[in-house]
């Protein structure tokens, strides 16, 4: 077990994550019922407030806190206990992030920030909402630098050695996160805050959108890479093999530093102010992440086959049945991976330049991120939660909990299949995203959307309700594992941190020379962004005043 | 760094498909002009109503085969009197906003334009079927967002 103080730090992060998860999923449940006109909200609460809260709490707060809980535990386990400075700065980071979260949440709940989590100008929220967001990001930076500090201490004590795979991947994710956040920090500090507090009158809208998406796309990789870490480092241990290839795992991760950032324009393909050349260039760069994704897919299935054959699986597919399906820690993550196959394919469709017009801002996109962040990432985190919390609290994960875990992931799978399939089809038919209930004055086209077997309001509501049920089972498991399950006393009752061995004898040292990757990343960012952003500043139209249209 | 033979085949296949795929998208975009809506023209968002073509929003015939449709989006509607355009002719849509970001999305077509204040979005489209098409805003623009729609008649 890792040091008690490090466990406390990790547990606090995970606790905040699940408080956000609880409220966020409740907001999701409310939404499906408002959308099918089965629920009327009281006058002080409106659909877009709920939508903002759902997006911010689940996509931003739940993920980020859980990721740090996971990182802290894994870094302490793989590199040794934190020193006093690392611990102190981790707590400061936690505090700053939490102050930001609380501030932004208060603004959303009080109706001062119904701007959704993309907060596109010139919708103008209270200045404090943007301050909250800035504090949130700065807090994550402090926590990130604390972990990097811990890593640097280890490097100094182990000169010339490659770091453990978990630490390497954590540092990769943090480097990507810090470079990515530069965009949102720039727009929030220099554009939104002066404008929202009235120090300047207008804002350059197109520039703010572009800086947001410079951050917005790598944000999704910030969610995904920790899930990949679980797939690369945790899963092999669960199925009884080593990491398939240490060097390829590291290479895949550094490729994400390079190709997750200079790609934000693919979220802006149907808008003016960016010429087709730059849009297309970033489409090409976007597609480069397919290479590390294919490498990851190969490693996963290679490991599955190795593990299955080791346990006596015969024939072309016999190994498949030999995998530890009765282990909820494994099955949950396997389902998460399976969801990522259509999820990734959908992403390729979305980023395909002119094809984007068919799906942009339709419900298809909502379906897409529910089978990317909403399942592959979220269900991987659930699969980690089952052992991570008992590991940190020293409590048992009983047979009953294991059964509940299975019910939880099965219900999440069914709910998500129903809801996301319905959303994908509705989007292709043309139904818009981010809208409260509307029949557009009973327009025949709008009525047609919701007429199918899978595309009626009931399917989405049933899916949403099953998901909420699943979320509540998870909350029960979390509360039990944190506070109520019996303490493990016998050795076999202790829950372990399953970290796979990784042979790094043949891994080239240059993979851990961060300056190479940071250098190439910045070169690509400059190629992709310098000219179009300069254009946006030099050829800017008169700026926009703020509007509060809610 | 060691690559397994099967992994080489798998990655090779992936990379070749990627190149083929991007080439198709690129040729279709730049040789056949199938690009998404966009445009580099700017406008003062406070002077939209006095700037051509938005001073006279609506349908204008440019020549025998081309029509221009200028529309101003605002919370929560579009200023566009009587939208009627012929089937089989090139229609050039021009959009801007006087307040926040909106979209101009015609159901059952490829017209799906982001409308950004200060910028003019352009999209050329040819309808191949007559009928009444629903136009809606699919970018969140405020509490009345889901009531922001209109209709275009193609004859």
Image (cartoon, rainbow, N blue to C red):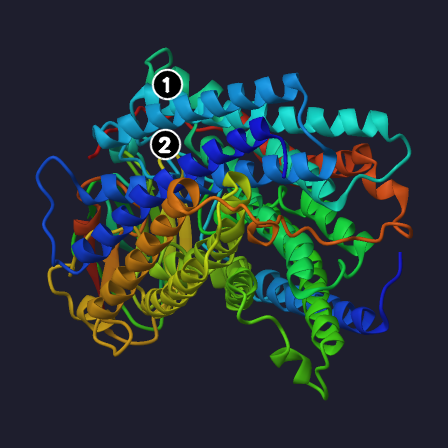
| 10 Å crowding of disc 1: few (<14), some (14-19), many (20+) | many
Place residue B120 in its image quadrant.
top left
Residue A203 visible? The answer is no
Residue A138 visible? The answer is yes
Between A407 and A244, the one lying in front of the other is A407
Q: Is residue A119 left or right of residue A539?
A: left
Between A262 and A385, the one lying in front of the other is A385
Location of mark 2 (residue):
A121
Between A111 and A357, the one lying in front of the other is A111
Picture coordinates of residue B130 (x, y %)?
A: 25, 75
Q: Is residue A275 left or right of residue A400?
A: right
| 10 Å crowding of disc 2: few (<14), some (14-19), many (20+) | many
Q: Residue furthest bottom?
A: A315
Q: Is residue A535 left or right of residue A406?
A: right
SS under mark 2: loop
Q: Quadrant of the C terminus of chain B?
A: bottom left
Q: Can you say whether A302 is above or below A388 in the image?
A: below
SS under mark 1: helix
Disc 1: host chain: A
Q: Measure the alpha-carbon separation of dots 1 and 2.
A: 10 Å
Q: Residue furthest top?
A: A199
Q: How many marks?
A: 2
Q: Is residue A225 left or right of residue B44?
A: right
User: Which mark, residue A94?
Assistant: none
Q: Residue at x 30, y 40 (%)?
A: A52
Picture coordinates of residue A206 (x, y %)?
A: 45, 34
Place residue A115 in its image quadrant.
top left
Q: Residue at x 79, y 69 (%)?
A: B7
Q: Are marks 1 and 2 in contact (CB under 8 Å)?
A: yes
Location of mark 1 (residue):
A195
């Amino acid at each position: 077990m890792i040091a008690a103080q490090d466990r406390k730090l990790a547990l606090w992060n995970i606790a905040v994550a699940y408080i956000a998860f609880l409220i966020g999923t409740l907001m999701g449940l409310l939404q499906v019922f408002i959308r099918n006109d089965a629920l009327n909200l009281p006058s002080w609460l409106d659909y877009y407030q709920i939508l903002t809260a759902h997006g911010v709490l689940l996509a931003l707060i739940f993920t980020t806190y859980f990721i740090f809980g996971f990182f802290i535990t894994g870094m302490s386990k793989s590199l040794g206990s934190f020193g006093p400075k690392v611990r102190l700065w981790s707590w400061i980071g936690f505090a700053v992030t939490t102050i930001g979260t609380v501030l932004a949440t208060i603004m959303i709940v009080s109706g001062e920030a119904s701007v959704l989590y993309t907060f596109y100008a010139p919708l103008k929220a209270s200045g404090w909402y943007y301050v909250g967001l800035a504090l949130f990001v700065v807090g994550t930076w402090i926590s990130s630098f604390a972990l990097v500090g811990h890593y640097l201490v280890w490097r100094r004590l182990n000169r010339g050695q490659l770091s453990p795979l978990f630490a390497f991947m954590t540092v990769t994710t943090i480097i990507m996160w810090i470079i990515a956040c530069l965009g949102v920090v720039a727009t929030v500090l220099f554009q939104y805050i002066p404008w929202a507090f009235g120090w300047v009158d207008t804002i350059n809208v197109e520039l703010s959108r572009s800086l947001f998406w410079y951050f917005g796309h790598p944000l999704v990789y910030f969610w995904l890479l920790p899930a990949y870490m679980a797939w690369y480092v945790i899963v092999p241990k669960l199925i009884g093999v080593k990491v398939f290839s240490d060097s390829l795992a590291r290479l895949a991760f550094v490729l994400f530093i390079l190709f997750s950032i200079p790609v934000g324009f693919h979220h802006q393909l149907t808008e003016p102010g960016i010429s087709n050349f730059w849009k297309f260039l970033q489409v090409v760069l976007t597609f480069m992440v397919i290479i590390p994704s294919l490498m990851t897919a190969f490693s996963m299935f290679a490991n599955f086959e190795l593990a299955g054959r080791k346990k006596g699986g015969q024939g072309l597919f016999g190994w498949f049945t030999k995998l530890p399906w009765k282990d909820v820690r494994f099955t949950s993550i396997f389902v998460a991976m399976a969801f990522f196959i259509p999820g990734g394919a959908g992403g390729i469709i979305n980023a395909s330049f002119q094809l984007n017009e068919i799906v942009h801002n339709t419900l298809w996109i909502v379906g897409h991120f529910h089978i990317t962040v909403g399942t592959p990432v979220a269900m991987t985190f659930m699969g980690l939660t089952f052992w991570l919390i008992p590991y940190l609290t020293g409590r048992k994960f009983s047979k009953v909990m294991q059964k509940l875990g299975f019910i939880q992931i099965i219900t999440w799978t069914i709910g998500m299949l129903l809801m996301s399939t319905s959303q994908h089809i509705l989007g292709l038919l043309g139904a818009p995203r981010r809208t409260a209930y509307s029949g557009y004055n009973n327009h025949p086209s709008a009525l047609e959307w919701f007429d199918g077997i899978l595309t009626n309001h009931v399917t989405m509501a049933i899916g949403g309700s099953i998901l909420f049920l699943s979320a509540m089972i998870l909350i029960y498991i979390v509360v039990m594992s944190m506070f109520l399950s019996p303490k493990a006393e016998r050795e076999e009752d202790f829950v372990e941190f399953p970290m796979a061995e990784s042979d790094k004898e043949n891994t080239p040292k240059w993979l851990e020379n961060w300056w190479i990757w940071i250098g190439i990343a910045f070169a690509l960012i400059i190629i992709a962004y310098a000219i179009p952003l300069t254009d946006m500043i030099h050829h800017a139209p008169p700026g926009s005043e703020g509007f509060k249209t809610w | 760094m060691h690559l397994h033979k099967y992994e080489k085949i798998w990655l090779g296949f992936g990379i070749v498909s990627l190149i083929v795929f991007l080439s198709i998208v690129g040729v279709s975009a730049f040789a056949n002009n199938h690009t998404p809506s966009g445009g580099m023209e700017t406008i003062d968002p406070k002077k939209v109503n006095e700037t051509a073509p938005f001073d006279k929003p609506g349908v204008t015939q440019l020549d025998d085969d081309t029509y221009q449709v200028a529309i101003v989006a605002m919370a929560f509607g579009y200023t566009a009197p009587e939208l009627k355009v012929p089937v089989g002719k090139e229609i050039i849509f021009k959009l801007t906003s006087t307040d926040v970001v909106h979209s101009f999305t015609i159901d059952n077509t490829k017209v799906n334009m982001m409308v950004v204040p200060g910028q003019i979005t352009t999209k050329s489209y040819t309808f191949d079927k007559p009928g009444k098409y629903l136009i809606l805003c699919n970018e969140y623009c405020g509490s009345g967002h889901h009531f922001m729609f209109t209709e275009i008649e193609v004859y």
